[in-house]
Image: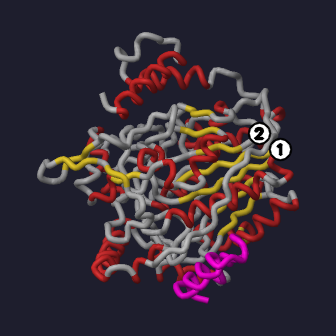
Amino acid sequence: MSDDQMGRREFLTRSAGLAGLAGLATVLPAETLISEAAKVQTSAALPSPRNIPIDTFVVLMMENRSFDHYLGWFPGADGRNKGLSYPDKHGKRHPTHPLAPDFQGCGFQDPDHSFEGGRTEYDHGTLDGFYIANDEYAIGYYGQKDLPFLPHAAKAFTLYDRYFCSLLGPTFPNRHYMWGAQSGGQTTNVIPTGSAGDQWETIFDRATANGLSARYYFFDQPFGALYGSRAAPWLRRTEDFLSDCQAGTLPNIAFVDPPFADGSGGDGLSGDEHPHGDIRIGQAFMSRITHAFLNSPQFRRGAMFINYDEWGGFFDHVSPRFVPDGRQNPDLAKTFGITGFRIPGVAISPYVRRGHVSHTTVTHESILKLISYRFGLGFLNMRHRYASQIGRTFDWGKPNFDVPDLPSPGPPVTTPCSLQASSSSRREARTEANAEEREGPSIGSPEFRRYLDRLGYDFEPSSAVTVFGNTPEARALDAMWKQRLPG
């Protein structure tokens, strides 16, 4: 028996024990064991809203990585990376494989994570379309030592191995679900035509209408601008988040976005972890934001969530879930009532369990549900109403205010894709064009920039030196970003 098989058996045995089903680990399906274990983990009562000791919620949303692709090795979690294989269009099977020391993937396609591509990968529940829709990059994975921050945060606080992105589709729709539990029926990345922007209600609208504070912190290109001119009061720079943390002046709701550079991987330089951005830049940004929150006086009454907008086309062995949605449809090709694949998700707070893996099924709306419950905001729509309550995974009666010693990696010295092998550069240009055709214009696309110009938004990006410190690596990264962004 291989080490991977032994690890899997041990995981299922532990899950069976937690569920009170010891001895049935080899009899019952894995999904049944994990579901029953999750029920035990969430059996404690949720405090009343007035007794929830949190008034500050932070969401840091990264880009385009699946759970197994990043955390398939994680102890105590339902992860798989080694030993899997996927067929190509001719039926030949290809094994999953480690990607490091390649942290960009410049020579490969950006894996398909479009509305249609996701359905190819899902293949009516067989989950065998990852290689058919992509190349070998999509079935590659990273190990514990390859990710300089996320595994440490996950081991220190609560990791979710059943965190599904909201929609089996691309970036913009999933980010919209994080903001408002819907995408307005959009299945691609859509840039509004007028200054009014997308008009459906978001958690920011509901919160500010009820006297709460809400801010969106961005590094270079504001996704929040898609909500038009009404979003202007919400917008702040990354350096404002750092200073607000230090001063203890964070709002009730704080959404933070990473450096998108010039969008869709930023020639291998973006800090959002979207292919083909160097994932170590994103990890350094994640560390900076997390440390700012941990060292803030508001940590004692706060909760921070690290998540990813969607799975990015990378493989995962757990099937998406069917969920209630106002736009659900019996036709799989049309429905909004199916989630995307699993993503990495971590909760950081004095009130979460330390060193814990939660098997509870959650989505982006589960965070919105805790926020709305705490502040009495009601529900934005059907998806919000029927989402699972992530607050049930917290340990409200046993707070731990100790700040763990987490690493503080800086951005690496890296090489843009365009300066690597010429064949890779040409392939990168082709696959980027294909991605935009499938998914719509990216953050940082000329169309997105023209939209910002119409709104009159200041486009001057934050500085890598301001965020990461005045180091040679940060100065070099700043210089490369400025070559790719309009001033």
Q: Quadrant of the N terminus?
A: top left
Is 305 or 198 nearer to us in this picture?
A: 305
Contact between marks 1 and 2 (CB within 8 A): the answer is yes
Q: Earlier in the sequence, mark 1 or mark 2?
A: 1
Q: Amino acid at mark 2?
A: Pro
Q: Is residue 327 magenta?
A: no
Relative image position of residue 292 (x, y in whole percent): 76, 58
Q: Residue at x 60, y 65 (%)?
A: 258
Quadrant in the picture for residue 45? top right
Relative image position of residue 32 (x, y in whole percent): 42, 22
Q: Quadrant of the C terminus?
A: bottom right
Q: Is residue 484 magenta?
A: yes
In the rendered view, tell whether residue 138 sits above or below residue 12.
Answer: below
Is residue 96 found left or right of 395 in the rendered image? Answer: left
| Magenta-highlighted residues | 459-487
Quadrant in the picture for residue 31? top left
Relative image position of residue 408 (x, y in whole percent): 68, 59
Residue 300: image tag: 1
In the rendered view, tell whether residue 39 sits above or below residue 321.
Answer: above
Q: Amino acid at mark 1?
A: Arg
Location of mark 2 (residue): 350
